[in-house]
Amino acid sequence: MTSSAIFLILVLLSLVSFAMTRQKALTRAGGDPAKLHSLPRHYGYFAATCVLLPSFFAFGIWLIFGKSIIEGLIVSGLPDRLFEVGTDQATLVLNRIRLVVENASSPETDPDILAAAQKFNDLYIRGIWAAFALSVSFGLVGFYLASNRTQPDFRARNKFERIMLIALALSSVIAIATTLGIVASLLFESLRFFHEVPVTEFVFGLHWSPQTALRADQVASSGAFGAVPLFAGTLLISFIAMLVAGPIGLLAAIYLTQYANTKMRKIAKPMLEVLAGVPTVVYGFFAALTVAPFFRDLGITLGLDIASESALAAGIVMGIMIIPFVSSLSDDAITAVPKSLKDGSLALGATPSETITQVVLPAALPGIVGAFLLAVSRAVGETMIVVMAAGMQPKLTANPFEAVTTVTVQIVALLTGDQEFDSAKTLSAFALGLALFVSTMALNVIALKIVRKYREVYD
Amino acid sequence: MSETNKDFKPTDWHSDEMNARIKRRYRKEKTFKAFGLGAVVVAALFLVMLIGKIASDGFFGFFQTSIELDIPFEQSVLGNPREMSPEAFQEQVKRANMLRLIDAAMKEHFPEITNRRERRDLIRMVSTGARGQLRDMILANPTLVGTTKRVSLLASDDIDQLHKGKIDKNEPEANRKVKDKELGWYNKLEEEGRVTLHFHSTFLTHGDSRDPEMAGIWGATVGSALTLVVTLLIAFPIGVLAAIYLEEFAPKNRLTDLIEININNLAAVPSIVFGLLGLAVFLGVMHLPRSAPLVGGLTLALMTLPTIIIASRASIKAVPPSIRDAARGLGASPMQVVFHHVVPLAMPGILTGTIIGMAQALGETAPLLMIGMVAFIVDIPGSVTDAATALPVQIFLWADSPERAFVEKTSAAILVLLTFLIAMNGLAIWLRQKFERHW
Amino acid sequence: MTDTKIAKMTAKDVHVFYGDNHAVKGISLDLHQDEVTALIGPSGCGKSTFLRCLNRMNDTVATCRVEGKITLDNEDIYDPSIDVVQLRARVGMVFQKPNPFPKSIYDNVAYGPRIHGLAQSRTDLDEIVTVSLEKAGLWNEVKDRLDSPGTALSGGQQQRLCIARAIAVNPEVILMDEPCSALDPIATAKVEALIDELKGRYAIAIVTHSMQQAARVSQKTAFFHMGDLVEHGDTTDIFTSPKEERTRDYITGRFG
């Protein structure tokens, strides 16, 4: 019995109840739909939702919590022998059991583990049947209730629409749930991290080397989690990116809105859209393969020491990526400036460039500032370019020729590859994620506020 | 009214000073305009460089060098299909050391080379994939056994790069991946016309491999497709329903405002944060399988949701109120007004937004790294719970590979990805133009 | 209509096209130094378009094409040797909606003199700003808050600020495109009084929808209809004894 089969059965059940209830409604009305309060199919819709909602709910609970519950049962039933070393062992043991469950040919020999895996399989099969039975009976109960209410005077459409409205509202709440999920998961894991590493060390520490000892009794470094070098690296690369994207994006927006003819705009705007649509992994590849070696070689020619994974290369490519972002938002801001202002300046005998720099841009300034803030937030959160083209060395430097690392690079480095979920090393990735989330969110909120306020002035 | 009788001196617009000033102002004007044009040109140049570089590298990724060798299909290695049951023959062929066939062919061709080490180097000019190639040939046609046939075998990645001119023959030997000795062999084969370049369909039809000449993107393509299907199934209905609610039904209150602000902010949250969410919730809490398109799709769905909601709302808003009034006037319930009249009219815009959201999801890499869709996977995933990778992740993985030959494979994979993206965006533009209405 | 004085600006057989749309059809009109000329007529009759030809503001519309001859002090303003920037400084313009720049009141007025280099020093500039504001009858209202933004003024004050801004570059002609249509009656009265004050120093052309306004502020009136100049003459003559049927219909309110 697989999950998809159960889903299919439940859907079938609801289709059947739709057809049956529709028929029943017609029969009750003596074959004359006009005698019914609602159309026959509304009775069907109502019954189908009465079947689907409770049964999907029951099955969803199993899908989400089933495995965790079974694992809990198994772990509590294991002999203490397996947990000698400490509480951390629980996850390790669980992982060994999971390995056996998922992979029949695993080299596991411990009889207790094997037995537990067997037990897991038994419980899982029992569980899935129980879930199946439960969700089907929920569905049948729903069908029975709906069927009972299928009377000509039952307001099926209103009931069904009421349910639809709730479904609509729930859908829009998912957006909130996502934010809450982000905040909760980041916060939860970060708190566990800060339990081991003080917040002050994370926020103010100047040394980052998350390689914790493999065993608790090892003398080797216990890892250092001062994130300042990462913040500095992120800022350095974002700054370089903005040095590229800011002027080019803004000037391009000015040219396209103020000077270019329609034909030119028709070519240039899609071009910028293409630039925006190129996946970041492609930019990363371009940065690592073409731009970084170019700067390194240029450095050799000029007698400069430019690292092969320099902040400069990553920053410039990131800047290219952000150009369309800056230009399209600046474009909006400039276009929103009323034409009367521009006319007023031109009518006084100002040249177009004087009009732009002294009247149009000051008027559009809040919008442009908002655009730049959003662009910075984009740069700070950008991952693939820096993962592929910036280095891994957490160095505290303002020299763009050196290799630096960023918050996103470290998150990826900490969470890809083999990992134990509980170590300070992996948890630190969530603390970095939290810092990233908070800072980009702050930038966005401020930017949107500025932009909105500015819109109010001219609307 | 006027508070003064003072008057300005008339301005002399034709004085030398004024003329010089005007000239200066026009010079500034020209410079400013040139800067603007320059910015557009620079952006265009970047794009041309990016696409040009990748296209020129990637073009060769679709082609692969082969070496034609006269392979003796020796009975001593393969067994005799006439004397064995078909099963036993198949078994023997599967276990047979195909390198011996290649070695024999090479010996025929380079009889002067007897040194074991050099012979091994000779064989290495042919890809490790050539063994499977030979095995498949024999299994498909057992009558080959006992004959000698000219077979075009995949060359190793180094010979391939040499043949494509990516390795400079004039560089000192110490810096060159292909040594002088191998260069000599290659030159001999080349002179005899045995080295050829073919279109390489394996790249489009096979999964990943450690050997660049055997690596393909089909596995990643299927992984991406499965991921996108999950994303679409989740994000499209939820996004559209949410947009309908917010635009048509939501009361104007604090909660609705909060949802609105929240959606706008969510659209700007870095994608990697969604990856962390997926890792913590879908893997950590729900224990869904790691590296699976299901989890990737769910994660990307949450990421795409704001895009779809925002586009759908704009599209629904653009439907004029008169249509709603007309339907209401005929006695339709609010729900019927929306689902029978507003949504069908808004559908082209909603679809356009959805396709653009899907294109974003297709190009997204970082969240997939977080949920483990970054493993080396040879098999083509069969369902949404199989371990899989996706096109952009495949590009990331190959970009990290040290082999020179992976550069062109990476670029070729990028070309494929860009083709999909252009197709999707083209479809969105077509939809928009075809169904665009001006009310 | 015979003009004995020398005209400040002369338009001869001016045609304006927006793409294929023939908006102004062969208009000939003179503006004189110490007169206010009112351009009246129903919406879309080409009066604003014609006005915008006089300082080449129509250049900013890509599809617009102007034929015919317009001279300022006998110089053809569409001649290639004429600099449009200078032309617009000499022929100032006030728009329908007050459009102060998002700058301080002082900077709004100082903007023109600054770009044209009309002031040699800060005191010069202060003088220009003060006198311009005084001429526009705004000085007493704003002298204590020259640093506050121009957009913070009331609508009527904003429009007078725009007039002060135009005066500050020392123009010879001032064009006004329905300057009072966005203002309340009291502000309108102030602006009308101001126009009357300014009449002696500048040649003024004013486009207006209001026949009463035309009658109040102008000495000459030109009636436009469908791109044609139907009738042109002394304001009193036009309003008391129009020669043309269409003029009579318009001023008596039969259409418009």
Image (tube, coloured by chain):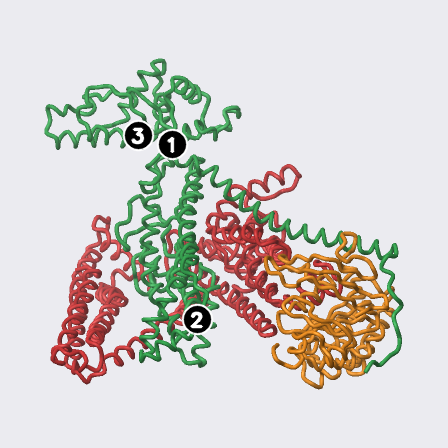
Color of chain A here?
Answer: red
B59 or B208, nearer to the observer: B59
Say which amino acid is labelled 3: Ala
Residue pointed to by mark 3 = B130
User: What is the crowding at mark 2: few (fewer than 14 residues within 10 Å), some, or many (at least 20)?
Assistant: some
Residue pointed to by mark 2 = B317
Say which amino acid is labelled 1: Gln
The chain holding disc 1 is: B
Regarding residue B393, the answer to whether it shows in the image is no
- Left or right relative to B185: residue B382: left
Q: Secondary structure at mark 1?
A: strand
Residue pointed to by mark 1 = B64
Residue A212, horizontal then vertical, whole percent: 44, 56
Q: Secondary structure at mark 3?
A: helix
Quarter that holds the N terminus of chain B:
bottom right
Label 2 vs 3, first from the N-terminus: 3
Say which amino acid is labelled 2: Lys
Regarding residue A384, the answer to whether it shows in the image is yes
Number of numbered discs on residues: 3
User: Which of the 4 image quadrants contains residue A27?
Assistant: bottom left
Label 1 vs 2, first from the N-terminus: 1
